[in-house]
Image (spheres, rainbow, N blue to C red):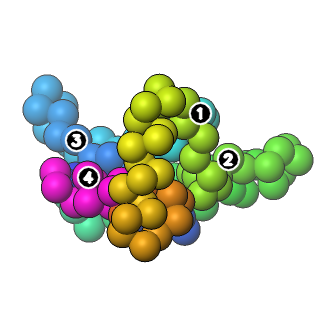
């Protein structure tokens, strides 16, 4: 993903705020709102790591389990004809549906 940073399994999207002339980051994939900002890329890296570390420490202090960005389990509802076509495509490729779907998703992500 362009304009992204990763630390301890957490990913943040980075944007430029031209009004305040700063870089702003937001953690993705969790419900808790974790943001950070800085004026330089080096400061942004430090602010990101500090934001993640603070989030994990705060969760521990209050006895809350920190949200994880993803579990690796993806449940999808698709029309039966799509499910059937995907299963046939997977089998014809010599893969399980999970392996095939993983490859298709990876290809779609990297095509951006």
The Cα–Cα distance between marks 1 and 2, rounded to whole angstroms, is: 8 Å
**Which stretch is magenta?**
104-112
Residue 42 on image: x %, y %: 26, 67
Q: Please report whichever mark, 4 or 1, sits nearer to the chain's N-terminal start.
A: 1
Q: Please report whichever mark, 4 or 3, sits nearer to the chain's N-terminal start.
A: 3
| Dot in front, 1 or 3 | 1
For residue 84, above or below residue 55: above
Left or right position of 85 against 99: left
- In this figure, which residue is indicated by the disc labeled 2? 67
Circle 4/circle 1 CB separation < 8 Å? no
Q: Please report whichever mark, 1 or 2, sits nearer to the chain's N-terminal start.
A: 1
Circle 1/circle 3 CB separation < 8 Å? no
- In this figure, which residue is indicated by the disc labeled 1? 31
| Dot in front, 3 or 2 | 2
The Cα–Cα distance between marks 4 and 1, rounded to whole angstroms, is: 24 Å
For residue 23, above or below residue 4: above
| Dot in front, 4 or 2 | 4
């Amino acid at each position: 993903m362009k304009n992204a940073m990763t630390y301890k399994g957490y990913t943040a999207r980075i944007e430029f705020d031209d009004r305040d002339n700063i870089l702003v980051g937001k953690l993705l994939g969790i419900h808790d709102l974790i943001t950070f900002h800085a004026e330089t890329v080096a400061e942004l890296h430090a602010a990101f790591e500090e934001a993640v570390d603070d989030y994990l420490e705060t969760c521990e202090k209050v006895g809350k389990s920190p949200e994880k960005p993803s579990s690796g389990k993806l449940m999808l509802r698709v029309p039966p004809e799509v499910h059937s076509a995907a299963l046939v495509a997977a089998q014809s490729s010599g893969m399980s549906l999970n392996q095939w779907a993983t490859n298709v998703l990876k290809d779609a992500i990297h095509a951006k």
